[in-house]
Image (cartoon, rainbow, N blue to C red):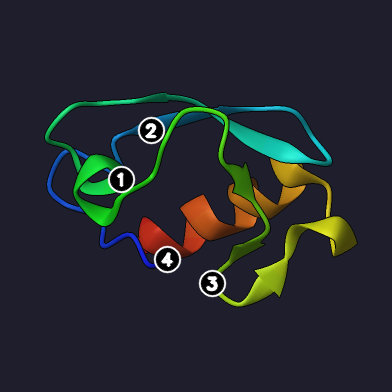
Amino acid sequence: MVIQRDRYGYGLTVTGDNPVFVLSVREGGAAHRAGIHVNDQIIKVNLFKLQLFSFVAFFFVVGEKQNK
């Protein structure tokens, strides 16, 4: 599944480090529109397998790229 970030973000919160699970999904948000559900496991972000990275470190890098 692909989630296209909207002006409010991705519309979900996650928990865990490895594995990473969806904790909540904002109704009407980008994740909800993409069909993401609570307790779904996130395996890849931007084609990178999360098993290879610390979740926190990976999203720090992803966030830095989006802010530039």
Q: Earlier in the sequence, mark 1 or mark 2?
A: 2
The percent coordinates of residue 62 (x first, y second) are 54, 58
Which amino acid, by three-letter code, is at mark 4?
Answer: Met
| Residue closest to the eye, 31 or 39 | 39
Residue at the (41%, 36%) spot, across then down: 37
Gap between marks 4 and 3 measured at Cα: 11 Å
The residue type indicated by label 3 comes to Asn
Q: Is residue 59 left or right of residue 24?
A: right
| Residue named by callout 2 | 12
Whichever of callouts 4 and 3 sits on the residue coming sooner in the sequence is 4
Circle 2: is it few (<14), some (14-19), or many (20+) Cα within 10 Å?
some
Cα gap from disc 1 to disc 4, whole angstroms: 9 Å
Question: Given the image, on which type of amino acid does mark 1 rest?
Answer: Ala
Residue 31 vs residue 40, the one in the foreground: 40
As helix, strand or loop, the secondary structure at mark 3 comes to: loop
Which residue does the numbered mark 1 point to in the structure image?
31
Q: Residues within 10 Å of mark 4 (few under 14, many from 20)?
A: few
Q: Is residue 65 left or right of residue 11?
A: right
Which mark identifies residue 1? 4
- Asked whether the residues under the numbered discs 4 and 3 touch, taking CB atoms below 8 Å apart as contact, a structural biologist would say no
The residue labelled by disc 3 is 46
Circle 2: residue type: Leu
Q: Is residue 39 left or right of residue 38?
A: right
Q: Between disc 2 and disc 4, whose residue precedes?
A: 4
**Camera-side mark, 3 or 1:** 1
The answer to whether marks 1 and 2 mark residues whose Cβ atoms lie closer than 8 Å is yes
Q: Nearer the viewer, residue 65 or 32?
A: 32
Quadrant position of the C terminus in the picture:
bottom left
Q: Earlier in the sequence, mark 3 or mark 1?
A: 1
